Image (cartoon, coloured by chain):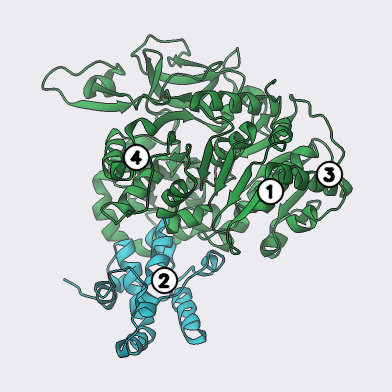
Amino acid sequence: MEYSLSQQVVLAKLPEGQHCARGLRSPIASLWEAALKSNVAELVTDVVARTAGVPHEKVRPGSRLVDFGIDSIQGLEVVIQLEWIFGIDIPDQDLPKLDSVKDVIDYLQLRLTTE
Amino acid sequence: MNSPRTVLEALDVAGSVDRGITLLGGRGGPESLTYAALGQLASRGARALARRGIKAGDRVGLVLPTGVDFLGSFFACLKAGAIACPASPLQGFPGRSAFRQHLSNVVSLVGPRALITDADLTDELGGALASGVTVLTANELLAEEALSPSISTDPQTIALIQLTSGTTGLPRGVRISHAALASNLRQIAAATHIHRDSIMVSWLPLFHDMGLVGSLLTSVFMGCKLVLLRPTGFLRDPRSWLGAITEFRATHSPAPTFAYRYVLTRLQGQDLSGIDLSSWQVAWIGAEPIPADLLAAFCSEFSRCGFRRETFLPCYGMAEASLAVTFSPVGEGYRLLALDQEKLLREGRAVSPSTGRAATVLVSCGPPLDGTSVSILSEHQQPVAERTVGEVGVSGPSLFSGYHGESEDEAFLLAGRTFLTGDLGFMLDGELYITGRKKELIIVRGQNHHPMEIESVVSRLPGVREGKVAAFGVYQPEQSTQTIGMLVERDRTSTHDAEGLITALRRAVYEETGLSIHGVVLVPPGTIPHTTSGKIQRSRAREIFLRDETAGRDQAL
C-alpha cells in the first residue's frame, strides 16, 4: 500500500479542522512549511492521482486535469484538498488558470513564495 | 389584488414592501438589495440600454455570476422590452478556452445585439464575438442616472431565451413569453405554498432554469425574501447551503438530485451542531432521476438537524415548460411505488411485484400543476392507459414558444401544442412516474447534454473511424448523477497509441464543450451497434462499454 506525504498531512489534521500549515503554531510548524514547499510537485501529483483514481506515474507535469476525466466538481475537490494541505485560499477567479499539473504546481509555488 | 400578469408587474408590487434579496459569499461580504432598489436599478439599466440603441425585441446576452450585477441587468433587459439570454459566466472549471468556445456558441445561436458582463470578462469576450455585438459592463449600465419611463409589457412578447445546455456545448434556445413565465410562476407558487412571508434559499446558477425561474423569479413573483449563494461556494463547502437555511430560517430551497447526494456524501457523520433544518418546509428535488434510497438516506442522516421526510418535494419539469410540470403535494411526504422489474423493463407495464420477483422502487413526481396536462403517448402518439409506459407529453399555458431559430413545428410534434419531452413514464392515480428516456440525452448534475455534440468532436479526430463513436450517460449511483462514457472505434490504419488517442479525445471534447469524458473504451472497427439505416445505437453501445470499461480504463491510463 502506498503511503504518501499528503496522507501524512491529512493524518496530522487538527481536531478543530483548522488548516494544517496555518493551524500548527509550534516549532514544528516551520518545519512543516519547509517540507510542504519542497514537495509541492509530489503533493500535487498525489492529490491528482488519488482524486482521479489513476497510478501516480501517469500524472506527469504536462498532463492536464481533463486527461484523467476530472470534471468541474472533481477539479474543485483537487483545489479544496490543496487549500487544506498548503493552508491557502485559492479564489474562484484563479481556477481557470489551473489546467495542467504544471499550472497547479507553478501556481502553488508562486503563492507559497510570495505569501 | 389581481395576480401580476408579468414578472415586471410583480417586481413593482414587491417593491412596495420592505423585502428583497440577500447575497452571500461575495468578496465584500453579504449584500442586500430590496425589491424597490432592484426595480430602480433595473430602470436605470433599461434607460442605459435604450441609450445604446437596444430596442424592444432585441436579444441581450447576460454573462454574469450570481450577484447584484446579474439581478439588475436581467430586470433591466425586461424593462427595456429586450429578450434576456442568461449564459454561464467563467467560473472555476472548465477553463478559458472552453469558455470562449461556449460564448461563441451562444453568440452564434442567439445573435444578441449586446452582451452584458463584468470587467473581469471583457478580455475573454474580445475573440469570441462577431462584429455588431456591443459589449457592456454591468457597472456602466447600472450607473446610469436617469430612470427609464415605465412601459407596459405585452404578456405575449418573449421575456427570455433559456439555453438548454447549461454551461457548455451546443445549446438550443428555449423562447419563453412573459405570459408563459407568469403562468408557471403562479403554478409553482400555488403548488409549493410559497407566499410573501416565505423565505427562499438558493445556490443554483441563475443561468439554469431551476435557479432562474424556480428560485429568483418565483421569489420576485411572490415578493418573498430570497437568499442567494454562489454555486461554487456551495460546491466548495456544501455546509454553507445548510448554514444559510439555518441562519435565515428558510422555508423553501430547491436543488437537483445530485446536490442532495453531494451534501450527504460530504457531510455524513460530521459534526453538524449549529445546523437546524426544522424551518425547511419544501425541498424541491428533480432535474434528474430521483432514487428512493437517496431520499431515505438523506432523511435518516439529517433528521438529527430537524429535517423532516415531508419536506422532500419530488418534481418534474424542463425549460420548455418554463420550468415545472408536476410537483408532489406539500407536506405529505414523497410517495414510493414498488413494481415488478422485469414487466416494467420488458413490457413497459407498471404492475406490483408478486412474491419472490425482483422489484424496482420508483418515486412519484406528483400530479401535473393546475392548468398543465400530462399525457402518456404510444410510439404512434396515441394516449395509452394508466400503468403503461410511454413518452411523456406536456401541454398547458406555461409552454415555450419554440426554439430560437427553428420553426415551431420542430418543437410541437402534435396538434394541440403538446410538447414531446423525450422522457418515458406512466401515470398512476393522477401522478407521474418517470422510468427513463427515449431521446438519448445525457444529464450531468441536472444539466442536459446531447450525445451528438460530443460525438461530432471525436468523430473528426485522426485515428478515429468517422461517425463510429457513441457517447452516453453512465449512471453513478454513489453520486446520484451521470458521467459521460464513450465507445470509440479506432481506425485500423491508425498509428496512434491508445493512451495518446484517448488523451487527444478528452482534450478535444473539453476544448469544444467544456465536458470531461469519464470513461473511454476503444474498440475495433465494426463493434459499435447500429440500426439498418446506420444510426448509432447508444444504449447498446453503453452495454458494451460497461462490460469492457475496466479493461478500457486500464488501457487508457
Question: Circle 1 sits in a helix, a strand or a loop, which is it?
Answer: strand
The relative height of residue B37 versus residue B129 in the rendered view (above or below) is above
Instruction: Label 4, secondary structure: give it.
Output: loop
Q: Chain of mark 3?
A: B
* Circles 4 and 1 on the same subunit: yes
Q: Which chain is cyan?
A: A
Q: Amino acid at mark 4?
A: Phe
Kindly identify the residue that appears in the image at 35 percent across and 84 percent down: A25
Badge 3 local density, few (<14 within 10 Å), some, or many (20+)?
many
Residue position for label 4: B307
B442 sits left or right of B102 in the view: left
Q: In the structure shown, which secondary structural element does the residue marked by tag 3 occupy? A: loop
Q: Is residue B302 above or below residue B117?
A: above
Measured Cα–Cα span from mark 4 to mark 1: 36 Å
Q: Which residue is mark 3?
A: B54
Q: Amino acid at mark 2?
A: Glu
Q: Residue visible at 82% across and 29% down?
A: B152
Q: Amino acid at mark 1?
A: Leu
Q: Which residue is mark 2?
A: A83
Q: What kind of residue is marked 3? A: Ile
**Secondary element type, mark 2:** helix
Residue A63 percent location from the top left of the image: 41, 70
Residue B161: percent from left, percent from top: 66, 37
| Residue depicted at x 79% and y 53% | B141
**Distance between mark 1 and mark 2 Cα atoms:** 31 Å
Cα–Cα span, label 1 and label 3: 14 Å
